[in-house]
Amino acid sequence: MIAALALQAASPELAYTLTIEEAADGPEVHVHVAFLGDEDGETILGLPSFWGGEDELWTGITGLSASGEDAVLTPGDSPESWTLTHAPGAAIALDYQVIQDREGAPSAAGDDSYRPFVQPDFVHLIGNTFVILPDNSREDETISFAFNAPDGWALASDLEHGVADVDALMASVIVAGDFRVMTQEISGAPVRVALRGALEIDDQTLMDNLAHVIEANLEYWDASGEPYLVTVLPLEAEPDWISIGGTNLADSFAMFITTNAEIDTVKRILAHEHTHTWNVKRLGGPLEGETEEPAGYWFSEGFTDFLTTRAGVRGGSFTAEQGVAQWNEFLRDYASSPVRTASNDAILDGFWTNPDIQRLPYLRGQVFAALADARIREETDGAQDLDDVMHAMLDSAEDGPAPSRFIEVAQAVTGVDLSHLHQQHIMDGEMIWLPEEAFGGCGPVETQDEPVFVYGFTLGENENGERIITAVEPDSSAEAAGFEPGMFMVQRVGGAYGDARVESVMRIRTVEGEERDIAYWPTNGEVLRVQQIAFSGDEAACRAALAGLN
């Protein structure tokens, strides 16, 4: 065994040791926790429950036991809560095993990447999904965390970056096994990438693009370098199925991608997630309460997308032309969202259950940021913009959650009252139409009518993860083209998802096994009003506009 001490505290109030042991049926993950029980002789233990859209996370915990003076452990009223009675203030040792609570390797079809993976060659854990926490733990509790792993196993975790508190522990990632760990110093701080498997993106290209992203963000926020970790877990998938996702954590990003992911898309996601280092954590934090937090995602996610483009173009991670292309994609996605006029209350209610609702605050928030930026520049005669508000929020982070402070800070800094726009578009959901000059030298924002994109068929999956047409809409262009229920969808070979202006070509396989391509126009004849930036071709002027350097 090798041991790697991830973080140490002089007198830790919570001491965790995670040990990976090789066993006949594969590796086992054991956790030992040492702490002092409550002075009243009863400590409630909180098991993982709901996080990141995953529920019943306690199913990944087994073999829970406790020792200490008079220690007795009994199940609580719910599966995520156990009661530990003991002598007042007794030293307690808690032990449990973390297991993978479903079969199989990480898969794009699985939609379960946040849950613990314990595989023959590797382990992947996120703090919120495996850590048991005593209820007497405070947010500022000092914590130590030690790792033990078999010889030859690589280890990487953001817990290695220094002494942690409870929040950092829960928002951490741990990978071990056949990972390749690269380290590069960026602005005086170590940045690591831990990845496994064979991606179409070579390791150094991934690291170089991450470095560009980080340098651009440090420039925008006028910040110094600090340790950062990106973990990359490849996903099994059908040929030509591309999936890229992940979750931003304390000072890390856990990424899950298919091996055919393209670097431009990966770079955009890396930039978005690294921007979360500031938004929302260092601007005042999210709205309090996990159930209330989605009500502020228009700011924490939408504004993050806006700042991703702004900092990226300013720092050279993206060209102005790439920035315009990104904006036009987001504007089209916003206009074509079937829930584009849903209220913010609807987002709060449906974020974790409706994919369209889940995407809405990203799109609406980004477009609202552009509207706010344009309004501030207009009313201050170009003297100020959204950047001034963001930096003021950074300086006043102690004053409260960022989403609830934005309007107040914007008015205090710029004198511009955005409250009516916020109520109209963010809270009530009214469609946002950007002014023609919103992107300055990039070119005018044009409003145009486009055909509505409609597949005309419904896709499902069989037990092998294959996509199957389960229904075809009567009298649709899909029916006329020859799509039939029972056909297998192999891949798209022409056109683009969401764009009915171009012909789509889909490769299908019949139940008899014959493959053929079907071309059709994926629309129902309806039109949609969309805004797009008509790129001027002036790279320098557009860069200045997108970067906020006018």
Image: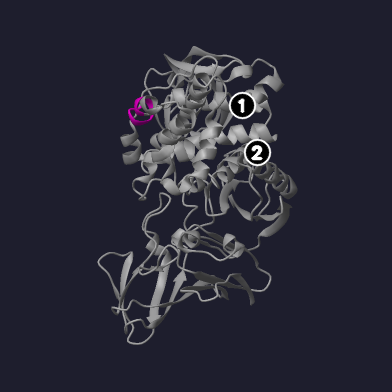
Dominant secondary structure, magenta: helix
Residue 160: image location, x then y, percent: 60, 64
- Please give the range of residues in magenta: 423-429
Magenta highlight on residue 70: no
Residue 196: image location, x then y, percent: 65, 56
Q: Please tell me which residue is depicted at 57% across the width and 53% down the height of the picture.
A: 252
Camera-side mark, 2 or 1: 1
Q: Please tell me which residue is depicted at 41% across the width and 71% down the height of the picture.
A: 62
Q: Nearer the viewer, residue 398 or 371?
A: 398
Bin the neighbour count of mark 1 within 10 Å (Cα to Cα): few under 14, some 14-19, many 20 and up: many
The three-letter amino acid code for the residue at tag 1 is: Leu
Q: Which residue is labeled 1 in the image?
A: 546
In the image, 82: left or right of 224?
A: left
Q: Which residue is labeled 2 in the image?
A: 262
Q: Please tell me which residue is depicted at 38% across the width and 80% down the height of the picture.
A: 66
Residue 127: image location, x then y, percent: 48, 61
